[in-house]
Image (cartoon, rainbow, N blue to C red):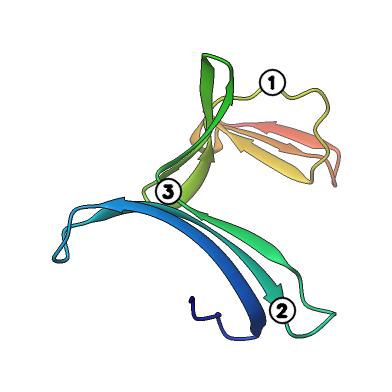
């Protein structure tokens, strides 16, 4: 039995873990359904990496490090977005304003 987070009426979870006495490591997945029909349903993954596989071809497109979810490997066909900041702020492409700025 899992406790549901605040605002959610149902939670289903799967966890794999090893170790004990406060020194365990785990990876888990939760599916949450809210009580309100206007609130979003959600799937939560708790892991250091999300690996997608096709046979023996493994890729880890998403990595969680230093408190950020990072896109690690991807082939993107078309990107729709407002602003891209690249190279630590050296290149800024603003799709909303239609500008490209380069800083040294």
Say which label, 2 or 3, has the lower sequence index. 2
Q: CA distance from mark 2 to mark 3?
A: 23 Å
Closer to the N terminus: mark 1 or mark 2? 2
Depth check, mark 1 against mark 3: the one in front is: 3
User: Alpha-carbon distance for marks 1 and 2?
Assistant: 34 Å
Which numbered marker is on residue 47?
Answer: 3
Q: Secondary structure at mark 2?
A: strand
Left or right of 82? Residue 51 is left
> Residue at the location (74% across, 85% down)?
35
What percent of the width, then of the height, locates residue 82? Answer: 79, 46
Q: Height in image: 46 above or below 102?
A: below
Among numbered discs 1 and 3, the one appearing first in the sequence: 3
Q: Which residue is mark 1?
A: 75
What label does residue 66 carry, if any? none
Q: Which secondary structure lies at badge 1?
A: loop
Relative image position of residue 102 (x, y in whole percent)? 63, 29
Question: Circle 3 — which element?
Answer: loop
Mark 1 vs mark 2, foreground winner is 2
Reading the image, the residue beneath label 2 is: 34
**Residue drawn at point x = 68 percent, y = 63 percent:** 42
Distance from label 1 to label 3 (Cα)? 23 Å
Residue 29, image x, y percentages: 52, 56
Left or right? Give the position of 21 relative to 14.
left
Residue at x 51%, y 47% (from the top left corner): 69
Residue at image coords 73%, 44%: 83
- The percent position of residue 25, horizontal first and vertical second, equals 27, 52
- Whether label 1 touches label 2, CB < 8 Å: no
């Amino acid at each position: 039995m899992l406790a549901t987070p605040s605002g959610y009426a149902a939670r289903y979870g799967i966890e794999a873990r090893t170790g004990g006495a406060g020194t365990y490591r785990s990876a888990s997945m939760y599916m949450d359904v809210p009580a309100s029909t206007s609130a979003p349903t959600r799937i939560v993954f708790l892991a250091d990496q999300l690996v997608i596989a096709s046979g023996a071809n493994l890729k880890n497109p998403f990595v969680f490090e230093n408190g950020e979810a990072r896109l690690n490997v991807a082939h993107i066909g078309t990107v729709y977005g407002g602003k891209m900041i690249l190279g630590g702020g050296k290149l800024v492409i603003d799709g909303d304003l239609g500008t490209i700025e380069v800083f040294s």
